Amino acid sequence: MGTRAKEPIRIDLDQFKLHIKIEPTRELTLHFNSPSRRFYLSVMAFVVTEMQRLGRITSIPLEEHLDLLAFLNETVGGSAGSSEKEHLLPRIYRKWKDALPDLEDARLFKVLGREKGYDGGMGRTYRLTEEEKDRWANLFEYKGSGEHVRLRFSIDKLGARLNDVVIAYGEDPDLVNEDAWGRFIADLKGKAEDKAKPEPSYPVFLKEPEAPVSQWRKRRIPLPRRWGWPALAAVIGLAVGVAALAVWKFYLYSPQAEVASVEKMAFPLPDKPSIAVLPLTNMSADPEQEFFCDGLTEEIITALSKIPKLFVIASNSTFTYKGNPVKVQQVSEELGVQYVVQGSVRRAEDRVRITAQLIDALTGHHIWAEKYDRDVKDIFAVQDEITKKITTALQIELTEGEQARVYARGTDNLEAYLKLMEANWLFGQSTKDGVSKARQLLEEAIALDPDYAAAYSKLGSTHGLSIVIGLSKNPRESLKRAIELQRKAIELDDSLAIAHAGLGFWLLYARQYDKAIAEGKRAFELEPHSADVINGYAAILTFMGRPEEAIPLFKDALRLNPKPPSLYLRFFGIAFRDSGRYEEAIAQAKRATEQEPNDLVAWVVLAASYSLAGHEEEARAAAKEILRINPKFSVARYQKEASPQKDRTVAKRYCDALRKAGLPD
């Protein structure tokens, strides 16, 4: 009990109980005591796990996790309620909205230690204080509805933080939170696979043997003397054969895996080896090691992306599978690739164990697998070795120049490297809070390694983005810093393509258009197979007044990154908008706002596109979202500071559309 006292909220996936301190002196224990009820506790645990993974209390979109939720419904929930996928999310939405917040009637759980009674002729309900009922109900927030719902378990309403919530599973007291959730899912998968195995078939005897088996075993059947040795040899040979077959099946044979179908792929297979590297699973007890695992995955993807003879899916897309039980076949078909890399990382103090395997999804065969036990300080060497093993397995030979680019090392400082990885994730949210936190981490990374070019480049981008989202107090100074920092990154590493792309982009805002397009071209020449570089170059072309040239490049970037961050989608929307294809612009901007509801630029693109397309009501609704995010938004200021179009008549046209939507000048 001493441990639990420090945990305001504990989700026990063994007992399917939720222990929660509604008030400092009062704890409730809720028992989810049937399959359908257990399913909803597992949904709550899933939402908490996702929030912990993201590092903030936020709403979690269910639509992109439908396969996992359907799996939970089939296993934990016993397919209770509607087991069809298309009905599952609306059912979860209704229960989250109406049933789970109801502590008094408690339709989805039993409140242990509290008795039910009659109150004023109504049915039996739990006798709880109004404050207890209200504080519990306030936990269940949501956005959207039906299939497009986003759930938020608002523990902050109780004054709790993410690290105050503990998810427990199994006997190991150190197995908590994301590790516990991972083990919980793995055990469910194991049980489901065992259940799916066919029962062994036995011959059916129409007539029972006359003598019992025990008597049959005692009988000796004498062989004729002249048959003795040949028969014995035959028996021995048969036994050896059976034993050899058993050894082969146990150690060497693996049943045929479920293979991917080229016909079912969302995209045509490229004309060169195509690969997706899934996030390496954190097997450590410490959830803080997530960024270590994610960083290792990112570096492998980055290295492979520099190889011209490979088609490599960007990390934004592969990371959408993080924490979810997915099959190689599913990943292959959804991303349109032949090969998939899987693996895990376990870090303990100064040691790290990494496992990795390369799988051909079209055959189900393991092409390569390896395990590494190393010192943490050797992690960068392991990254290079994994990259080399993959290229060798795929029979790809690199020139000396290609090897130099692929194995170029940005930093040897592990802590600086991890700070950059976390900053990249925060920057991708395009929110004021995310950009501010990313900037702080990047400054810390540079303090640890003053020669870390990639950290300077990303830091420059935070200063530039602060202008666009209204975070900067001095836009002119922010733009100056953005350009200076990109140039510093190039000075340290002229081969850093993303720094050239970043410099080109922010030179647009300085109205230095010739220099901007030159830097964009340089970035594209350095890494023509990087989704981020292609996206950046396409954005530069768009603002240079060449959206028709940019649109095919955006499509290439999205093929490499089929599940992209919102900034890809909003830039693509701008290209459609500036070329007069307003409905297509609306589609891309809507995807961006659904993915990141606080992406100010995406809402600006959407409001202008609606207005230009004549959808006035929708344009006004989008304008309200802009003012929700930034109540001080000014069209005139946006046109001056955050509209880098070379053709100023284009900027004026869409800014007039924003005014028409109801935004203040």
Image: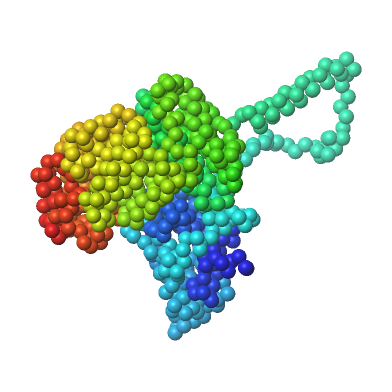
Q: Quadrant of residue 230?
A: top right
Residue 223: x %, y % from top left: 87, 21
Q: Establish if 471 lies above or below 3.
A: above
Residue drawn where x is 36% and y is 61% of the image: 142
Is residue 524 shown left or right of residue 207? left
Residue toward you, 623 or 28: 623
Please report the residue visible at 23 percent of the width from the left and 32 percent of the height from the top: 518
Colour scheme in the image?
rainbow
* Residue at the outermost right position: 225
Give how far across and how far down residue 238 sits, in percent. Answer: 75, 23
- Relative to residue 665, is residue 217 drawn left or right? right
Q: Quadrant of residue 630?
A: bottom left
Q: Quadrant of the N terminus?
A: bottom right
Q: Quadrant of residue 533?
A: top left
Q: Residue furthest top?
A: 226
Q: Nearer the viewer, residue 54 or 82?
A: 54
Q: Is residue 620 left or right of residue 233?
A: left
Q: Is residue 272 left or right of residue 73?
A: left
Q: In the figure, 326 relative to 311: above or below? A: below
Taking depth in this image into account, of 453 and 579 the one nearest to the observer is 453
Task: Tell me what residue is drawn at x 88 percent, y 15 percent.
Answer: 226
Residue 410: give x, y in percent of width and height.
42, 36
From the viewer's perspective, is residue 129 above or below residue 64? below
Which residue is at a point 56% across and 41% down the rendered structure image?
376
Q: Does the image show residue 12?
A: yes
